[in-house]
Amino acid sequence: MEFYLYLALFAPLAGSLFAALFGASPKTIVAGLVPSILLFVSFVSSTVLLVHILSGGAVVHVEMMTWMATGDLYIPFGFVVDQVSVTMMMVVTVVSTVVHFYSIGYMDHDKGFNRFFSYLSAFVFSMMVLVMSDNFAGLFIGWEGVGLCSWLLIGFWYHKESATWAANEAFIMNRIADLGMLVGIFLVYWNTGTLQYEQAFAAMPSLGTDILTLMGIFLFIGAMGKSAQFPLHTWLADAMEGPTPVSALIHAATMVTAGVYLVVRAHPLYDLIPNVGLFIASLGAFVALFAASMALVNRDMKRIIAYSTLSQLGYMFVAAGLGAYWVALFHLMAHAFFKALLFLGAGNVMHAMHDELDPFKMGGLRKVMKGTFIMMTLASVALAGIYPFAGFFSKDLILEVAFVEHHYIIYTVLLFTAGLTAFYSFRLVALIFHGEERYKLFGIHPHEAYKFMLVAMSPLLLLAIIAGSFKMSYFEMVTQVLPELEYHIHHPVTFWIMTIGTQLFVIAAIIFAYRKYANAKVTVPDGTSKIENRLCYKVLSNQYYIPYAYEEYVVKPYRELSTVLWKQVDMKIVDATVDGIAGIIYGTGEKTRDMQSGNLSTMLKWMVAGTVGLLSLAVVFGLAVRYSAEIKAILSGLGV
Amino acid sequence: MEIGLNHYLVLSTILFAIGLIGVMRRKNLLLLFFATEILLNSVNIAFAAISHYYGDLTGQMFAFFVIAIAASEVAVGLGLLIVWHKRHGTIDLDTMSTMRG
């Protein structure tokens, strides 16, 4: 089994390095195909490992080599495949294999084709390190690796000012959060003396609640950054500047769920501090609603899906915060499939519309893009949580968790958000695929994507439909390491009322969205209509003015402070000191150059001067040594 | 008044000072050699005097070494001086500045 572990882990790295060989040369299909095939190999290996674990096999734990060993500190490059990490491995490899094959078509006309695959495979490798590591240090390497690849890929079209800006924003925001995470890791090491999950978690119950709370909070700050939770959420929507496959893989299915994975992985810690768990759940519920409300009015297709991702991450954190770790992981998995599908569908639409992102300028595309239409509709159905699609099982489970745990406020918020989710998803579908063909006004001739791109997407479609049926076998597998909490609403009547009520509510939201946006009366908004001038619309479409506030109250003062520090401290003190020392040395050199006149007579004079100087020094020191006692007495008398 | 060690040492110091000033002031290479000879021999006087004072022959032996080395140094130096004079027709120190940095 070790062989499969290494194969799953290193195949993406090999693919990345292979594609990097062609980094500077023009597009070659090999640079795309080889990493894709290697990823498929990685996927197959992960499947082998999954089967091994499912059939009751032992957890695969390997220690590749020692990384750091100094004194008491021992950190190996260790990898573990247990029930939790194998889930993540499957999610990562399935989605990334699909995205790789899809990207061969999507990036077809891009100059950076080879470079793209190199980055994308490097990302998968980092993500695998993140999920497979058996210690916090390895997790952190993967954590930073995915951050780096995310930066590279958001800013992939680096000639675009907005792309580089978004890439930097994402990187800096993550850096702020990573500092918190690093502090959390230090706290773990400080108090438990190890970074290995097993030993660290085993040592935790004997620690005080205060220190555990601090650990939990700091680790969660890291998770907040990676999973874009409020108030570090703004980067995710801006990250949509990257190519769409990147959004599908990194900013929907895998990287942003790393925060959830961290909380799930650290469940022995969060079990000990239910207050922090409640905070995580409350923040998750808030973000779910907050992000969904921003998606309601947005006019950028990819941003709408990004907000939806944000909202679903909120759901996952609710489940994880309330102790239902397996539910969080299950929703993570289901969400990865349908959200990646949705993004890839959006990528097809973007290609068809020549990178137009405003769904109001589309309409009626179902006639020309049948395949994409079906896939996006089904993905939206799954996202809305209609029976029997994947979203129904995972999302309803989170609602049940909140209900059973008596957190009725969270439950209500999530239920309301489920309605909003259905509304904005189908608003998007209706605007893109139904109604008048508004794109004709803009002279665009849409066309369907390559056949093989649609074929590449089909595994995701299948999984988005059937993932829910894995629920019970998944529960049995993953609860071998996660707390075994099954959520049953005891009264069957309550259960049925809740389930059917939720379904009806969601369906009503979908119908409302269709009625409002699928008719012929929809026009391209020009800022004059009544709704656009309402206060709440303006607040929502400006994302609650949070990016504006960050720019105004964080970035600008910071920049001014930096300017002051640069001009006053850096130039006048630091630089001046360094320049001054250099200047003194230069000046001395210039002046003493005259000594080297080459004239023997002058040299002799200098020699004599040197001799006299050395002799007098010898005399002075000799005297000082002889009278050292007296000199000390005098000095102490002076108070030195 | 009996001549004691101090007198020899004072003589040695005076000669050393004369030699030092000569080394610093002379512009003629030949006279520079004279000045260095004065320096060396002032030290020889001190060696011999101190050796006699302590009744230890080491100092006097050392003085012989110094004389031998001074002789060979002058031999080499005078050889170079003659070559220099043949080449340049002068032995003025100020003309020797090929090592100017």
Image (cartoon, coloured by chain):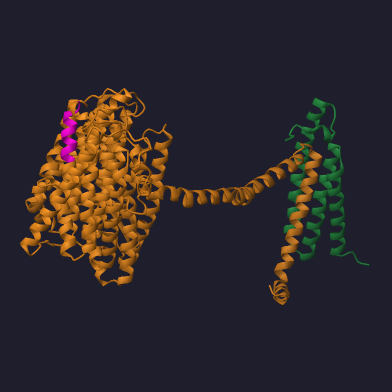
Chain colours: A orange, B green
From the viewer's perspective, tell me whether residue A559 is left or right of residue A535.
right
Quadrant of the image occupied by residue A402: bottom left
- The structure residue drawn at horizontal position 48% and vertical position 49%, both measured from the top left corner, is A552
**Magenta segment:** A368-379
Quadrant of the image occupied by residue A362: top left
From the viewer's perspective, tell me whether residue B100 is left or right of residue A414.
right
Q: Quadrant of the C terminus of chain A?
A: bottom right
| Residue nearest the observer in this picture, A326 or A184 | A326
Residue A1 in sight in this render: no
> Residue A610 location in percent, x, y?
75, 50
> Residue A29 location in percent, x, y?
25, 25
Q: How many marks?
A: 0
- Membership of A375 in magenta stretch: yes
Residue B75 in sight in this render: yes
> Residue B82 location in percent, x, y?
80, 30
> Residue A324 location in percent, x, y?
18, 60
- Membership of A626 in magenta stretch: no
Q: What secondary structure is the magenta-colored segment mainly?
A: helix
Q: Tell me if residue A488 comes above or below residue A235 in the rendering.
A: below
